[in-house]
Image (tube, rainbow, N blue to C red):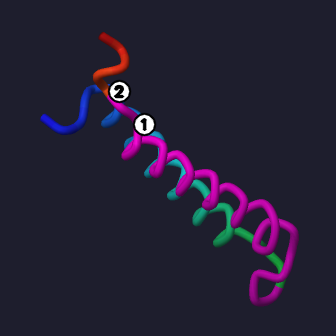
Amino acid sequence: MPFGRKNYLLMIAGVITLVVGFIIMSIDSEPYGFGFLGLTLGPLVVFAGFIIEIVAILYNPQKDK
């Protein structure tokens, strides 16, 4: 298997972070999402989710042994 258990757990955490970021952006009450949640917090959380996904893909499971 190219990925270990830790890779899959990180991938799941990344997907959950991405979903939470998109939900944060969608609950912004300002018109067209131009509030703090839609323009600042949501995109930062989504960016963090993509960073987690990149780390999950690049993490070497052989390092733990």
Judge the density around disc 1: few (<14), some (14-19), many (≥20) Cα neighbours within 10 Å.
Answer: some
- Front residue of this view, candidates 21 and 44: 44
State the separation of the CA atoms marked 2 and 1.
Answer: 6 Å
Instruction: Point out which mark residue 29 bears.
Output: none
* Residue 57 sits above or below residue 35 on the image: above
Image side of residue 3 versus residue 14, left or right: left
Residue 59 in the image: x percent, y percent?
Answer: 40, 35
Residue for point 44% across, 51% down: 15
Image side of residue 36 versus residue 24, left or right: right
Magenta residues, start to end: 31-60
Residue 6 in the image: x percent, y percent?
Answer: 35, 27
Judge the density around disc 2: few (<14), some (14-19), many (≥20) Cα neighbours within 10 Å.
Answer: some
Asked if the residue at tag 1 contacts the one at tag 2, i.e. Cβ–Cβ closer than 8 Å, the answer is yes
Residue 41 in the image: x percent, y percent?
Answer: 78, 60
Residue for point 68% across, 69% down: 25
Q: Which amino acid type is marked by label 1?
A: Leu
- Element under label 1? helix
Q: Quadrant of residue 11?
A: top left
- Front residue of this view, candidates 28 and 3: 3
In the current view of this chain or complex, which residue is farthest to the top? 65
Residue for point 58% across, 54% down: 20
Quadrant for the C terminus in the image? top left
Q: Which amino acid type is marked by label 2?
A: Lys
Instruction: Point out which mark residue 6 bears.
Output: 2
* Predominant SS along the magenta part: helix
Image side of residue 13 versus residue 46, left or right: left
- Front residue of this view, candidates 25 and 48: 48
According to the picture, the residue beneath numbered tag 1 turns out to be 10
